[in-house]
Structure formats: structure tokens, C-alpha cells
Amino acid sequence: MNKLSQTLQNTVAAATFATLLLITGNARAEDTIKVGVLHSLSGTMAISETTLKDTMLMLIDEQNKKGGLLGKKLEAVVVDPASNWPLFAEKARELLTKDKVAAIFGCWTSVSRKSVLPVIEELNGVLFYPVQYEGEESSKNVFYTGASPNQQAIPAVDYLMNDLKVKRWVLAGTDYVYPRTTNKILEAYLRSKGVAKKDIMINYTPFGHSDWQSIVADIKKFGSGNKKTAVVSTINGDANVPFYKELGNQGVSAEKIPVVAFSVGEEELSGIDTKPLVGHLAAWNYFMSIDSTKNAAFIKQWQDYTKNPKRVSNDPMEAHYIGFNMWVKAVEKAGSTDPAKVQEAIIGVEYPNLTGGTAKMLPNHHISKPVLIGEIQDNGQFLTVWQTNTLVDGDAWSDFLPESKPIIADWTAPISCGNYNTKTKKCSGQNYK
Amino acid sequence: MTWQSCASTLRIFHAEKENMKPNFTRCCCCLMAILMLLLPSLTLSEDSANEAVYTAALARLNATSMTERSAAIDQLAAVKAPRAIVILQALLDGHLFNLILENKLVIGTEIDAGYKLIDAKSGQDLGIAAREATQKINLNNSLRVSLRKTLGRLQLNANEAKARMNAVQAIAKDIDSESLALLRERLVVEKDVGVQDEIRLVLGLEQLNSTDKTERLGAIDLLKDQANQEVVNRLNALQDQDTEGQFAETDVDVRNYAKAALVKINARLKVYAAIETLFFGLSLGAVLVLAAIGLAITFGVMGIINMAHGELMMLGAYTTYVMQQLMPDHLGWALILSIPAAFVISALVGIAIERGIIRFLYGRPLETLLATFGVSLFLQQTVRSIFSPLNRSVASPEWMSGTWQINDFLSLTWNRFYILVFCFLVFALLLQILKRTRLGLEVRAVAQNRTMAKAMGIPTARVDALTFGLGSGIAGIAGVALSQITNVGPNLGQAYIVDSFMVVVFGGVGNLWGTLLAGFSLGIANKLLEPVAGAVLAKILVLIFIILFIQKRPRGLFPQKGRAAES
């Protein structure tokens, strides 16, 4: 091997090692409780996930200021799975076996969660997953603090159908498990509401897609008829920026064809000029613009922590906020960080969310949330135009897909199962599909 | 007082002009404000008459409920006064605020220190307020639509033809008998041909609902030459059948006439669609060519497999970002200046890579590949450390956003159009450099026969460095173009490196024309396939096609000929 490439290789190896040391080497004291943070700090998902890492560090820092947990200090173990799905599993294994963390907070995309799932079940860890997802899953070891489809997608479609009188639907998404499953559920739901097949257009694009010309032109054509058309977007990651840019450039205004997005929050909008996007919609369970004292305090804390008075907060951050505090409460209740004890103690734990309600951990490992629909304003914030009166309980298995209709998840005795078939009265065990 | 405020408003107006940030709505607002202030007597008399209505409406506008706000808009519109229009326009433009402490509505113009305020009710100048002291009066979509329509009605008699045109279009979105009467009145006195046509179109569409058969036939006659989406929709609707097989249009003659008109329109639509697809393909091709053309020099002419090529583009894109940060008020100039800046920066980095690494590895392609891949990771991480791993937002100047609306069915986006033109310019320039300059001559000589060139006294080492620098610099320029259409982030380069190699290999290594043709044909092929197969499958199909093509013609579209190519 050449001398030069050898040196290069060595340097890279040394640099990686040094970074690892820096991250994990702090405070090696025995009397700490370790908390794993598993979010991509590089790659295509870094745009969304870096913020969550910082949120976790802030929450842990705050808990330590309050005196830690069970008399011990909390210690964050941050690893970078680099938007590389198999690496998520590797890093999760490392966190559980090498660092022996009490709980992991992490993942964004569903592929990363699916990749971590077998590891976390094998080693009986605890994972808090903070992002809205497609449902059809409930693991003993995972707590889903983001929205399931009935807490985001279905109410959003209802809003479009009832309030905006939308008759034609474009379901546009990135090509992976979350958009595909969500669109399957949505299509079944729309068909059950009497929407004809020709009035539904489904489109998938790869991660990081940047040439949206013809797709936006197609959407424009599809929506040019007499029927009111809306786009339901499950486009994920940084592909959203060129998508919205193209919408703005081709003059697809929200008044003509509104786009309701499930993965675009304040953070993603802070990277684009929102003037042409005013009026497009997003469905979430939290908006930064929500007027509540808890939210104001949270935003102030976040901006002080990041030393950036313009830093925005978003929905998955709130999910981590709720999830982390529920975990703290459960550990205190159980008097131990032992995963088995925490899993039992956390069911039924309540914690106030930032929008003025109280989230509750349900037996199916999902939480109750309000559903909000907001319109994008020119300052990159959302104006709430519709919201549910009460909190909605997360439903793991969609009632709109025939195969998952009879299935429920209940992790309390006597069922204690993530996919219990109420018809055959059988628990079919987990699947990692 | 009045003069003072007037002068200050004018000052802002001038300052804006100097800033070269033309904001027409804001200027309009200012002009209207000036007008208002110049006519104090008129406003005063109105005040006494409509004072009560104003006060009530403004209070309701300030309420949080959207229904209240909507009622307030109707109330304000009912007072047909210039100031109501100013307030409504400000509301639509997002310039209407609530001054939190005093709980009163103000119209604000954005300046550096916060907002320059004018009292909405009296038109009084209120000085400057900090951003935090105000709260914007928000709108939702349905309110925005109705507000546009209301404003349209109020502005139907505006002085500028453009304002009237907008007014007619806004009214057309949601037509009712009152609006129709207004439009008919306007048509009698309207002088501008464009506005006349627009009104006739709206009236013609309405005429389709007439109970008289000849009226309806006349309407179709009038409409059939219009390239308008609404016309197509309405003519299509005439053919609709309800569940019992009853046609929406009862008369057979009208139906057939509409059908004939539709056939003609549809034929035109097909042509437009083809032009659009061609444009999309060309613009995607332009991006590919821009990305690949630098590689065509380093890989094609010099034979270096440079995996860091994408990162050199990324550097160009980040240069644009930095330039915009340095000149936040002159986005357009920043973009234009970024072109030479990006060229220089990427070229320097390229030369450094060549002198520092690649020159030790000539003739060992595998090691060059690995080393340059290492360099690409290094560059990515450097950018990540300096600019953060998050994407940076690069704004588009005004002249690059929006569309060139040829008619209702055909519109081309400006940013893609400029990139297409830019691509041709870069290509022509590069061709001239290679053909007509001394460097170009030396480059070609070294590429054809290195030893012979050396024997002729050409400093091959220097030429190598300069050629690599040229290719890298072009990559930097491509980065500037990419910053306008995609995310500027550390991964920008990776997304284009594979495509770039594909284009160069498909076009024929060492041939610039081949690269150009390959880029455009791949772009068009992609866009032709995309509607049929979807974005993912289209890419796969193109890739398979290239693999098969390379099997048949291993040297690409335009293979190099001669002895040099054989070795």
C-alpha cells in the first residue's frame, strides 16, 4: 500500500478514535445513570436529527440540575449512526452492551427504527421513539411518543375532506416504509369514504430527490380540473426544500392546491424562504406558535441552551420532552432503571405536554396527543387553523386496513402482547417487517 | 406633523429604491399612504361619516376568531373608501399589526430597527416600534381567497391596468351575480385590451349557463380559442352525465359543438405538453452537463478518476452561500459574483489536490480512486465542522424565481431557464479555452501523447496542475448553479458524482461534445420515462440502458480515435 494513503488512513482512524473518546470519555464515574442518544449527526437525516440530540442533552442537563435521578447523575452517551440504517443497529448494540445505558432515545426514520428493533428486543433495552410514524407495530421495548396515523394522517385528511371540501388526492412520499404504509392506510381510508380510484394519485420519490419539475407539473395538471385537489405529503428529509421551492416557482398556491405535510416542521422551514408557501398546511401534535406558559418556558430554555435566540422548536422535540420526563417518572416510581421494571411502571404515567393537555402512556406503548393542523405563515411558523377538542389516544394497529383491524396491542396482563388478534384470541409474536 | 410623516415615508421609499429591493406591494402601500395624507380633507369628511363603522370593524378585525375577522372584512369593504382598501391590502400583504400595549391596529413597514408604523384608523404616523411590540393579524386560506375577491371588487376601477387585471382574476375565482354586474359595467368603460379580454372570458364562461341555446353556442364560439384551464373544465363538464345517464347539457347541438372545440383544444394541449417535457428534460440535462463537464476534463482528458469531484461542486455551492452572507442586500449580484469566486476557490483546491496527492499516483487509477475518495470525505467533514451538518439556505434572487407564464397550459420556471442558458455559456467558454488558448493547446497535446509533448518542451507537470484546476473550477461553477435548485449541504456532491461519471462514460471519454449530448439525452430520457414509470424506476431504467449501451459501444457515443486512444 502506498505510504500516503496509509498515512491518510491512519489520520482518519485517529480522528475517529479521538472523536469517540471525546464523546464517550466524559465523566467515567460509577455513580451515574447512562442515557443513550441515537440520532444521526451526519448524512441526509442530520437536518432533522441533530436538533433532537441537542434536545436530549438539554433535558438531561436540566434533570441533573434538579438533582439527577435516584440520587445519581445522568450521563448522556451520544453516538452518530450517520443516516446509515444498519449502523443504527450496530450503534444500538454498542450502547446496550458496552455502555450499558438504561434507556435509548433515538431514531427518526422508520427504517432506522426497524433496524434497531431486533437488537433492542434481543438485549431487552428501552427505546423512546419521538417521531410520527406509520403504526402497525408495538414492541415491548419501544415507546412511541410520536403520532400514530390516527393522531396525524387521518385527522388531517378529515380536515381537508370536511373543511376544505377536497375531492381529489395526491399522495406524494419518499420511497420507504413510513410513506408507503401511511399511504396504504390513507388510500384504504379514502376509498372507504367513497373517493374513486381515479381521484387518487400516488407518487414516490427517492431520498434526497431534487428534480421536482415534472412531478409538480403533474400535480398541477391533476388538480386543474373542477374538483378541489390537495396533496398529502409524506416526503421526508431534505428533499422537501427543492419540492417546496418548485411549488413556489410553478405558482402552485395553497389557495389552489393546498399541500398538507406530515414531516415538515419549523426546523425544516427554517431552511427555506417561506413567502411562496404561505397557507400550505402541516399536521402535528405541537406547534412552536402554541400559546401556553409551558411552551413559552420550554422555548426560552431551548434558546438559552443553544445560545441562539432565533432557534425554533418542533413536534419531535416535544415528543422527546414528554418521553424523557415519563421515563424519569417511571424510574422514580419503580425505584430502579431496570428495563423490565421501567416497562411495567411507565404504563399509565401522565405528564403535562406543552400544548396545555396531559399526555398519558397507554398500554399499547403509545401516548395520547392533541391533533393540530396549521397553515404556514411567512415567518416560518404555523397558524393553528383546526384542532381536536380532546386528546386522541394513539392506535398502534390501523382500523382501516383489513388485515390489522382485529389486532390490538396491550402490554398489561393478561394479554401482554404487541399484536393480539381479538378474533382468534392469539398473540402472534413480533414481526420485524 | 403630516409633512414630517410624508417626508419620512418618502425617505423609506427612496431608501428601498437604493437597496435595489423592489417590493411593489410595499411601494403601493406607501404611495397610497402618501395619497391619503395628501388629501386630509377628504379623509376627514369620510371619518365623520364612517367613524362608527370603522371603529367597530377594526375592533372585530383585531379579534382572534377567524369568523369575526371575515365579518370585519365585509364590513370594511362595504365602506367604499380609499382607506378601507389600504387597510385590506395591508391585511392581505401581512402588513397589518396589532400594537400589543395599546391594543390598536397599525400598518407596519419593515425596516432594520423593527416596523415603521402608521395608525390604521387615522393614517397618523406613529414612529417606529420594535418587532416584539407588535403582533401580526393572521389570515387563513379561505379568508385570503375572500379577501382577494373583496379587494378585487374594490379595485376594479383602479388606475393601473395591472391592478385591474388582478382584480378581474380575483373576482373570477368565485363568481356571483353582484360581481357579474360589476364586470359588465367595467367592460363598457374599459380601455385596456388585456383587461377587456379577461372580462370577456369571465362573462363568456358565465354565458355558458344561459338558458338560451344560441347564447350558449355563442359562448363556446367565444371561448374555443382561449388557452385557459377554466374553459377546458367547463367544456368538459358539459359532457358529464349524471347517475341516470342525463347529460349536464341537455342540448345535443351545444354538446357536439363543445366536443369539437375540445378536440381542437386538446390537440394544442398535446403540443404544449410535449414542449414542457422537452424543457424539463433539457433543464435536467443542463444540470447533468454542468456537473459532468468538469469531470469530462479531469477524467476524460487526463484520465484521473476523481471521486472528490462532487465535493468541488459542493465548495462552489458553499461559496455562493458565503457570498450571499457577505452581501445580504444584493442577492442577484452576490450570485453573479459567486461564479468567478467559486471558480477560483474550487480551482485552487483542485490544484492543491493534484499537487499534493494525485501527481504521485499517475498511472495507478485504483489508488487515485481511493485517495480522492478519502479527500472527498475530508472535504465533507471540513464543511461540516465549519458550517454545521445542517443544510444552508441559499436564496434565489427575484429574477430567478417564478415562472414565465406563456399561457395557462405552458409555463417555464425561470431558474431552470437561466441554468439552461448558463450551461450553454459555460460549455461554449470551455470549448473556446481548449481550442484557442495556449493552455488548451498544451492540454490537448499532453492528453494525446505525454512523452512527445514533454519532448517538445511543454512543462507537463504544470499543464497537469492547470488542467486539473480548470476542471475543478468548472465544478465550482456548477456548484453555484446547483445551489439554486437543490439543498446546499455537505452531501450535495455525493448526489451528483454517480450521475456525472455516467454522463462522461456514456458520452465517450475525452469528448466534450459527447458529454453535452449525453447529458441532454439522459435528461430527456429521464423526463420521458418519469410520468410513466415513476422517479425511482425511471432512474433504474436509464441506468440499465447505459449498461447495455456500454456493452455494445464500450467507448461511449463519441469514442476517441487515433493512436493515443488505443494505448
Image (cartoon, helix red, strand yellow):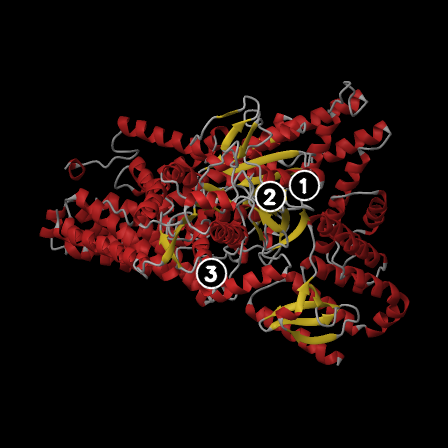
Q: Which residue is mark 3?
A: A63
The mark total stands at 3
Residue in the image at 75% along x and 35% along y: B222
Three-letter amino acid code of the residue under disc 2:
Val
Marks 2,3: beta carbons within 8 A:
no
Q: Outermost residue, top direction?
A: B245
At numbered mark 1, what does the secondary structure look like: helix, strand or loop? Answer: helix
- The answer to whether residue B372 shows anywhere in this view is yes
Q: Which mark is residue A260?
A: 2
Cα–Cα span, label 3 and label 1? 39 Å
The reply to the same-chain question for discs 1 and 2 is yes
In which quadrant will I find the C terminus of chain A?
Answer: top left
Disc 1 target residue: A159
Disc on the earlier residue, 1 or 2: 1
What chain letter is assigned to the residue under label 1?
A
Q: Nearer the viewer, residue B363 or B311?
A: B311
- Estimate the x, y position of residue A163 in percent, counting from the top left: 71, 41
Label 1 crowd bin: few (<14), some (14–19), many (20+), radius 10 Å: some
Residues marked 1 and 2 touching at CB (< 8 Å):
yes
Q: Residue at x 61, y 45 (%)?
A: A252
Crowd around label 2: few <14 · some 14–19 · many ≥20 (10 Å): many
Residue B439 visible in the shown view: no
Q: Position of residue B311 (x, y in %)?
A: 32, 52
